[in-house]
């Protein structure tokens, strides 16, 4: 913002007051324009942040709903494996002939939220709106952390048995069974967190 004083020297108090008044009005007009420009910039920043976060949450919702739909099949698979281990420990035949410890990771993004925070857009949003965003992304982080731990458990389960469970030592079978029970518990937690996250996504998009 540049303010240029009127040309010519003041020859009376009246001229001086006029010049001071002119400078003051000029400053107020310049500040007003500057304020409008800053306001427009802030509104644009908030609008872009809302659109970016909205698209991100929509994509995350599709991802989490897809994962939730597959939970039941994964739980059933773990139950079959537990039956297989029980049969192997009891030296009885089993209808399950293949060990398949599958795992699916939901690809959830937080880039839109993180960008809005870095760009300062959150400071210009209403507090309840920021609170809801913070809540939903906090639950998303809990879900992501749980998935990472569950993946470690699943990986450990895969490495427990090296071949045919019916020829494996009882000690290895017991360890395998414990790991399967941990996977079962992980799936229960993932199911609850996934449902809660899906609900919060929908609430945020409303």
Image (cartoon, rainbow, N blue to C red):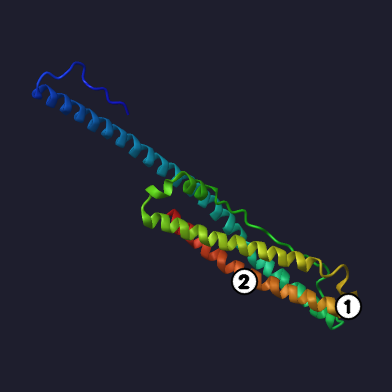
Between 111 and 99, the one nearer to me in the picture: 111
Q: Which residue is disc 2 drawn over?
A: 188
Residue at the far bottom in the pictured view: 90
Residue 17 position within the rendered picture, expressed as x and y whole percent measured from the top left: 12, 27
Q: Mark 2: give few (<14), some (14-19) or many (20+) Cα within 10 Å.
A: some
Quarter of the image where one finds residue 131: bottom left
Between 179 and 12, the one nearer to me in the picture: 12
Between 37 and 192, the one nearer to me in the picture: 37
Residue at the far top in the pictured view: 8
Count of picture labels: 2
Q: Which residue is disc 1 drawn over?
A: 169
Residue 92 position within the rendered picture, expressed as x and y whole percent measured from the top left: 86, 81
Instruction: State the quadrant of the N terminus.
Output: top left
Q: Secondary structure at mark 2?
A: helix
Q: Is residue 76 visible?
A: yes
Q: Is residue 138 left or right of residue 185?
A: left
Q: Secondary structure at mark 1?
A: loop
Residue 90 position within the rendered picture, expressed as x and y whole percent measured from the top left: 84, 83
Instruction: State the quadrant of the C terminus.
Output: bottom left
């Amino acid at each position: 913002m540049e303010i240029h004083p009127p040309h010519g020297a003041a020859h009376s108090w009246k001229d001086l007051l006029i010049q001071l008044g002119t400078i003051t009005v000029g400053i107020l007009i310049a500040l007003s324009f500057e304020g409008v420009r800053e306001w427009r910039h802030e509104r644009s920043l908030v609008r872009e942040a809302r659109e970016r976060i909205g698209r991100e949450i929509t994509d995350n919702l599709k991802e989490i709903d897809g994962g939730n739909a597959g939970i039941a099949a994964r739980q059933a698979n773990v139950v079959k494996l537990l039956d297989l281990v029980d049969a192997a420990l009891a030296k009885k035949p089993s209808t399950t002939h293949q060990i398949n410890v599958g795992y699916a990771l939901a690809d959830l993004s937080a880039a839109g939220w993180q960008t809005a925070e870095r760009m300062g857009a959150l400071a210009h949003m209403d507090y309840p709106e920021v609170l809801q965003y913070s809540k939903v992304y906090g639950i998303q982080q809990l879900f992501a952390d749980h998935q990472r731990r569950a993946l470690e458990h699943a990986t450990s389960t895969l490495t427990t048995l090296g071949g045919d469970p019916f020829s494996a030592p009882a000690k290895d079978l017991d360890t395998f069974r414990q790991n399967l029970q941990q996977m079962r518990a992980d799936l229960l937690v993932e199911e609850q967190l996934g449902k809660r996250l899906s609900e919060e996504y929908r609430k945020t998009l409303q």
